[in-house]
Amino acid sequence: MDNVKLNVKGMSCGHCVNSIEGNVGKVNGVQSVKVHLKDEKVDVSFDSKVVSLKEITNIIEDQGYDVGQ
C-alpha cells in the first residue's frame, strides 16, 4: 500500500469532507481516505497497482478543489 498526504485547497465545510471521502473512498484500490479540513490535507492509502495517484488527484480536482503535494 502507498500512503500519501495531499495538500488540498478549497475545502471549507463538512460537505467538502463528505464529498472527497465519499468519491475517493469508493474507487477500486483505495483502502482509506481521511480529510483533515483545518490543515487542508487529505491522507490516502491506496494500491498503486490498481489505481494511480494521478487518478485520485483528478477525482479531487474534478470536484473543484486544488491539489498540491
Image: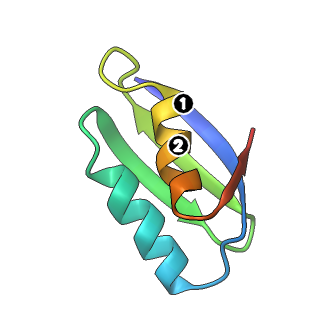
Structural distance between the alpha carbons of marks 1 and 2: 6 Å
In the rendered image, which quarter is residue 66 located in? bottom right
Q: Which mark is residue 58?
A: 2
The crowding category of the residue bearing disc 2, from other C-alpha atoms within 10 Å (few below 14, some 14 to 19, many at least 20), is some
Q: Is residue 35 left or right of residue 55?
A: right
Are the two marked residues, 1 and 2, in contact with CB atoms closer than 8 angstroms? yes
Q: Which amino acid, by three-letter code, is at mark 2?
A: Asn
Picture coordinates of residue 13, whole percent (x, y): 59, 85
The crowding category of the residue bearing disc 1, from other C-alpha atoms within 10 Å (few below 14, some 14 to 19, many at least 20), is few
- Tell me the residue at 53%/75% (across/down): 16
- Tell me the residue at 28%/32% (across/down): 29
Say if 60 sits above or below 55 in the image.
Answer: below
In the picture of the structure, the residue carrying the numbered disc 1 is: 54
Judging depth in this view, the residue of 2 and 23 nearest the camera is: 23
Say if 59 sits above or below 18 in the image.
Answer: above
Q: Is residue 66 left or right of residue 49?
A: right
Q: Which amino acid, by three-letter code, is at mark 1?
A: Lys
Quadrant position of the C terminus in the picture? top right
Q: Which mark is residue 41?
A: none
